[in-house]
Image: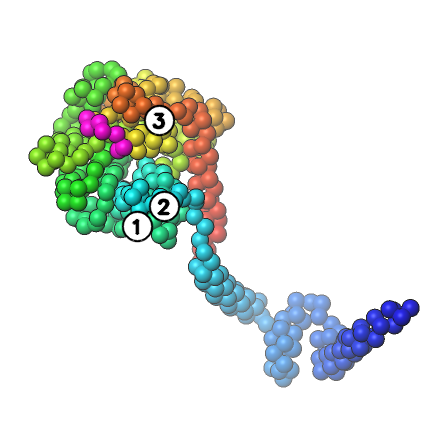
Amino acid sequence: MASINRLLLRTGPCILLFFLGLFVGRYFLSVNFPDEWDSRSTRSQAAELYVGGVAGNREEQYLLSPNEEDDRLLKDLAEAKERISRLEKKVALVENRTPKRYPFVNFLNHRAKKRILVTGGAGFVGSHLVDKLMMAGHEVTVVDNFFTGSKRNVEQWIGHENFELIHQDIVTPLFVEVDEIYHLASPASPPHYMFNSVKTIKTNTIGTINMLGLAKRVGAKILIASTSEVYGDPEVHPQPETYWGHVNPIGPRACYDEGKRVAETLSYAYAKQDKVSVRVARIFNTYGPRMHVDDGRVVSNFILQALRNETLTVYGRGNQTRSFQYVSDLVEGLVSLMASNFTQPVNLGNPVEYTISEFAAIIRTIVGNNNPIKSIDATEDDPQRRKPDISRAKLHLKWTPKVPLREGLIRTIAYFRGVLEKTKLSQSVIYYPN
């Protein structure tokens, strides 16, 4: 009983003040705004209260016309948008003050840590390579002109003490101090490298000269990312590194094919003349998350068409063959090649071969839509067979691809599905004024 009395003594005044406040407030409203307090049921009366009662100017109360009500609502909407914008800025400010959480990075002492430059490091393959090098504990500098690359691919590292991003075209000389250079800069899909064929040639010649010159100046080891396109439309199958290729030097693909062949020639000229330590990787078809959605290559084309429930279009009869390696396998191969003492070109690809028609059917099955498959006109100089001989990689790098095609495609399709969902979401919230 004593405890109840103490409780009443403590809370009684608060309860009394609460009810007293309710009574005073109700009395004040009923005296000053009797009309608004008694009747606010219709829309016109609500508008009257909004304009007159809330404003506190009873002499200027009036009923809003429909147009005036619309203007008032538009004004309120504009004010709300302005407040939301200010709130978003405040949230962004708070987020900037909050320490960013990065993926796990291994600790390396100053002797083991390398300074590594990745050209084209914001692109599809380059960004996965950056992830690998950063998590290993190295200092990584990315240079990219963002023609096909994207900051989104490396945003998880922006602000990290071991990471630096430079927006620059490698046709312009670059002056940095590094220990290793991965030279990946170049558009790699036909629509992208054909978009500006002269620029593609410059990137693979002048840009390569700049990187080789940088490696010579600072004594860095350099890896040149070449391509299976140096074999052209091959007459030898599968293609070993000793095969010189069958390339049309004036065809639509020549800007890329011959550009990479010249890049290899330049690399070994610098190696012989200036003792630059070079590595050359001939990369075959690669797929995985962060692929450019509209790069026009067979993987992205089929996945997008299947997800959109469209007809899968096959160039030609569909009996041309390709081999597909997952991006993580390629990254492992690049790192192994850089760490090795082998200086001759090395094929990096998956030796399992599929026809284009078979590949389209596999993607259709994984996506789960019964898309029709249609043949259209073949493209000019489209290679009919493509399969790497990876004997060198097995022997000198102890490297073989590990990710099965189906597993890699499931991951890639999930990525593309997420991109499409984000695109739909962004389009749904766009405001289109009348």
Disc 2 marks which residue? 154
In three-dimensional space, the C-alpha distance between marks 2 and 3, rounded to whole angstroms, equals 22 Å
Q: Secondary structure at mark 2?
A: helix
Magenta includes 138? Answer: no
Residue sitting nearer the eye, 365 or 166: 166
Disc 3 marks which residue? 325
Residue ID at (78%, 75%): 14
Q: Secondary structure at mark 3?
A: strand
Q: Earlier in the sequence, mark 1 or mark 2?
A: 2
Residue 297, located in which quarter of the rendered image? top left
In the image, is residue 174 above or below residue 94?
A: above
Q: Earlier in the sequence, mark 3 or mark 1?
A: 1
Neighbor class of circle 1 (other Cα within 10 Å; few <14, some 14-19, many 20+) is many
Residue sitting nearer the eye, 191 or 125: 125
Residue 168 seen in this snapshot: yes
Looking at the picture, which amino acid does disc 1 mark?
Leu
- Image check: 65 left or right of 230? right
The outermost residue toward the left is 273
Residue 238, located in which quarter of the rendered image? top left
Residue 253, x across and y down, in percent = 20, 30
Disc 1 marks which residue? 165
The outermost residue toward the bottom is 59
Q: Are marks 2 and 3 in contact (CB under 8 Å)?
A: no
Residue 421, x across and y down, in percent = 47, 42
Q: Earlier in the sequence, mark 2 or mark 3?
A: 2
Looking at the picture, which amino acid does disc 3 mark?
Gln
Question: Which region of the structure is painted magenta?
Answer: 338-344
Magenta includes 341? Answer: yes
